[in-house]
Amino acid sequence: MKNTLNIKVALWGLIMFLLLWQALAWIVHRPILPSPIAVVPVFLQLIGGELGLHFLASTARVLAAIALAVVAAVPIGLGLGMAPRLDRAVSPLIAIVYPIPKIVLLPVIYVLLGITDLSKVFLIALIIFFQILVVIRDEAAKLHPELILSVRSLGAGRRALLRYVYLPASLPAVLTALRVSVGTAIAVLFIAEQSLTTYGLGYYIVVETYQVLRYREMYAGILAMSLLGLALYLVIHRFEVRVYRYQESANEHARK
Amino acid sequence: MIEIENLRFTYSGKPPIFEGYSLRISRGEAWAVIGPSGCGKTTLLYLLAGLRRPDGGTIHIDGQQLVRPRPRSGLVLQDHGLLPWATVRQNVRLGLTIRTFYGSDGRHAPTDEKLDPQEADRRLNRWIGELGLENLQHQFPATLSRGQRQRTALARTLALNPDLLLLDEPFSALDAPTREDLEQIILRLQEQGRLTIITVTHDIEVAVVMGRKILAMADGPNQRAQIIENESACGPGSERGPAFQDKCSELRHLLGGLI
C-alpha cells in the first residue's frame, strides 16, 4: 500500500481539477455548467448555513451505515472463516446474493421499514456489509493452520484467537473493502435521499436546487457530496497505511 | 512426566499412525524423535501438545490426562507461527499477553503464576536478551532470517516458563553456525533447569546432538516404541568427537532404508 496521497499531490490534483472545470465551463458555455469562480464562493457561503445541515445529515447516514455494516459483518465473517464446514454450506447463498445491486431493493426496504432514516441507512449498510463479509471471511480462512496451532499452544482459546489473530489479520483487508465500497455507498445515498426527506445532499441537489434551476447552488451541493466521499476515502486510507506498515517494511527488505 | 498408554491415532482415509503405542518420558530428559517424513513425528508433537486428541488410549502429563493444550508445555513449529503484522517484541510478548487476557484460570495459564505487568516486562526483556534479539525488537518477521525467526519463536515460548519444550524441525534450513548456536542455547536450558525437551527431526546428526534418548519412528502403524540410548554422544559441540560419528553410523544402520 503506497501512501500516494500527501498534501502536495492533493493540492496539485485540486488545481488541475479546477482548471479542467474552468475550461469545460468556457467550452460548454451554458447555465448548466457554471465556472468554479462562480460556484466556490456560493459553496463557501452556503456551507456555514443550510448546505452545512444537508452535509451533516448525509455524513451521519453514511457513518451510521458503516458502523452497522461493520458490527454485523465482522462477527459473521470471522465465524464463517473459522468454521469451514458452515462456510461451505452458506457460501453458495452468499455467492448468489453478493452481486445483486442492492439499490434495486430500495422500494422493498421502503415498504418494510418505512420511508425513514433507518431504511436509507439500512440500504447503504447492506452494500457495505457484503463487501466486508466476503473479505473478512476469506482473510480468516486464509490463515495458516500452523499459525493457529502455534498460538493455541501459547494458551489461546477461541476468544484470544479472535482478539490477537483473526481480528488483526483481517483488519487491513476490511479497511480496503471499506474504502472501495464507500464510493458505492455515497452513490446509493444520493439516490435514497431524493425521496421524502428534508435534509440530505441528495435531496438538496435534486429537489432544492436542480428542479428549480438554481445551478450554482446545485454545484455547491455536488461539491459538498464530493468532499464527503473524498474525506471518507482519505480517513480510511490513513488507517490502511498504518496497518499496512509491516508489509511496507517487508517490501523494503525485499528490495534491499 | 509423560505417559502414553495404548495410543491410537489415524487421519481419516489413511492408514493408522499409532496403534497400541506406549511410551514413558521422565522429567528433565532430552529426547529426539527421528523418522522418514510423513511417518507421524509432527503428529506425535501435536498429540503431546494437546492440539490433537487420540482416537484411543491416553496421554498423561504430570499425572493429568491431556485433553487440551497444557499451559506449561511449549511448542515451536517448523514455520515458527509468528504474527506477520507484529514486531519481534510484540511476537515474543504474545504468550504473556494471552495469559494476561485470561488471568490465572488454570486452563489457559497456570494457577500458581503471578503475572503483573512488571513481571511480564521482566521476562520479555530477559528472553529477548538471552536469544540475542535486542537489535531486532522493532522489526517485522518478514525482514528476519530463518534463524532469527526461530529465535523469536523460541523466546516467545520460553517467556512462558515451560517445563516441557516440543520442537518441530528446529534447525531445518539453518546454516551450520546458526544451527550450532541454537543447539547450544537449547541444550544449556535443558541442563540448567528441569526442562524436558522433545525434538522432532529427520536429520540423523540433529537427533544425535539433541537426544539423550532417540525415538525412531517408521511409516505407520507404529506399535512399539523403538528407543536408542545416546548417553555418550549427545550435547553441544559433540559433532567434532569420534563418538558422534560412530553413533550416526549406528543410527543410520539401524534405521536402514527408512531415511
Image (cartoon, coloured by chain):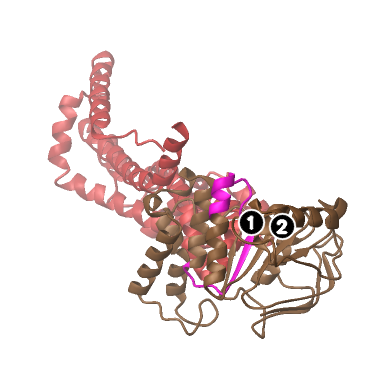
Which element carries disc 2, helix, strand or loop? helix
Residue occupying image coordinates x 30% and y 50%: A59
Which element carries disc 1, helix, strand or loop? helix
**Dot 1: chain letter:** B
| Amino acid on which disc 2 is placed | Ala
Residue B238's tag is 1
- Between A58 and B6, the one lying in front of the other is B6
| Magenta region, residue range | B159-181
Check the image and report above or below for B66 versus A27: below
**Dot 2: chain letter:** B
| Amino acid on which disc 1 is placed | Ser
Left or right: B23 with respect to B144? Answer: right
Q: What residue sits right under mark 2 in the picture? A: B243
Q: Position of residue B101 (x, y in %)?
A: 44, 73
Q: Position of residue B58 (x, y in %)?
A: 75, 79
Q: Position of residue A17 (x, y in %)?
A: 27, 25
